[in-house]
Amino acid sequence: MAASRLEINFIRLLSRCESIASEKRGETEWRLEKYVGALEEMLVALRKSPSKPTPEVLTDYTRKVDFLKGLLEAEKLSSTAEKALANQFLAPGRTPTICNERMPASKTVHIQAKARCTGEMRNELMGLGPSDTDSSESDLRQRRVVPLDERQSAAELDAILQHHHNLQEKLAEEMLNLARNLKNNTLAQQNIIKQDNQTLSQSMRQADVNFEKLKTESERLEQHAKKSVNWFLWLMLILVSFTFISMILFIRIFPRLR
């Protein structure tokens, strides 16, 4: 399916943003932030468009826009170590934005950003300011032998990077353990709820059986009570009849004295 006009403009602006991000920008550079805001609005419009691209393409577009937003947020951090750590968590796009790219431009920007943060950390360890960066780099290219303190600074930089890497691995392992524990707790709670439901169902069935038994016994007791009343009435009738006949016979046998 051919790309719509909105998607073509989105791709052009995205390619322009990636190109600006790959360049060394000053503090007064404002275009990238404005362009990324426009990209977000165009991405929302793309999702609502009748001729929107496939879900996979939309996911990659979202990934690239989120990467540029994260890159801008990382650049606003004050500490170089925080910038380096934030850049480590950025996820660039997986496919080229335009056809003539051998490697996705967002990956190139990511590599450049990480290299830039590494250079800034190295300069901080060496005690160099931003103005001394270019001159120090040219001097380092001309030197064949690295001084001892510079080698120590490089070793300290490697130790810091290794420390951040270990922290990331530890954090990932803790998150994995938390997810595993959450899964186990969820399964345990599901089993408990299932057992409670089974117990409740059995109790309800037993209650129904007991109710039926109670109803049957009540009916039998009612019938037995009716039978007992009937026998009592017959007994009273027989007794009254016997008394009446006895009185008649007594009168006949013993006549009245004159």
Image (cartoon, rainbow, N blue to C red):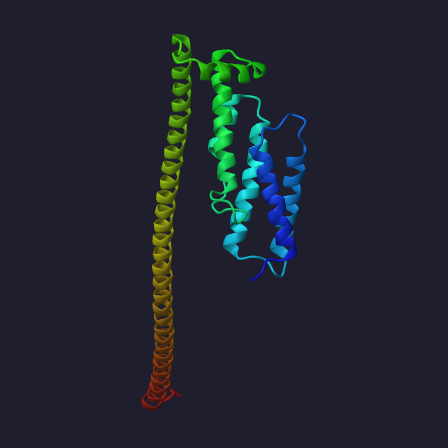
Q: Quadrant of residue 78?
A: top right
Which residue sits at x=50%, y=25%?
117
Q: Is residue 91 in view?
A: no
Q: Quadrant of the N terminus?
A: bottom right
Quarter of the image for residue 238 reads: bottom left
Picture residue at 52% right of the left edge, 22% below the top? 80
Please indicate whether residue 193 sits to the left or right of residue 96 in the image: left
Instruction: Give 14 or 57, whichever is nearer the viewer.
Output: 14
Give the vertical position of 115 relative to 64 (above or below): above
Q: Does 181 appear above or below 190? A: above
Which is more toward the observer, 76 or 241? 76
Residue 113 is at least partly visible in this image = yes
Query: Number of callouts in the render?
Result: 0
Q: Position of residue 37 (x, y in %)?
A: 65, 41
Residue 209: percent from left, percent from top = 34, 66
Quadrant where the C terminus sits is bottom left
Q: Is residue 109 above or below residue 164?
A: below
Q: Residue furthest left?
A: 253
In the rendered image, residue 140, in percent from the top left (x then y), is placed at 46, 15
Residue 19 lies in quadrant:
top right
The residue at 51%/30% (across/down) is: 113
Q: Depth check: 238 or 46 in front?
A: 46
Give the residue furthest to the front: 142
Q: Position of residue 155 (x, y in %)?
A: 38, 16
Q: Residue furthest bottom?
A: 252
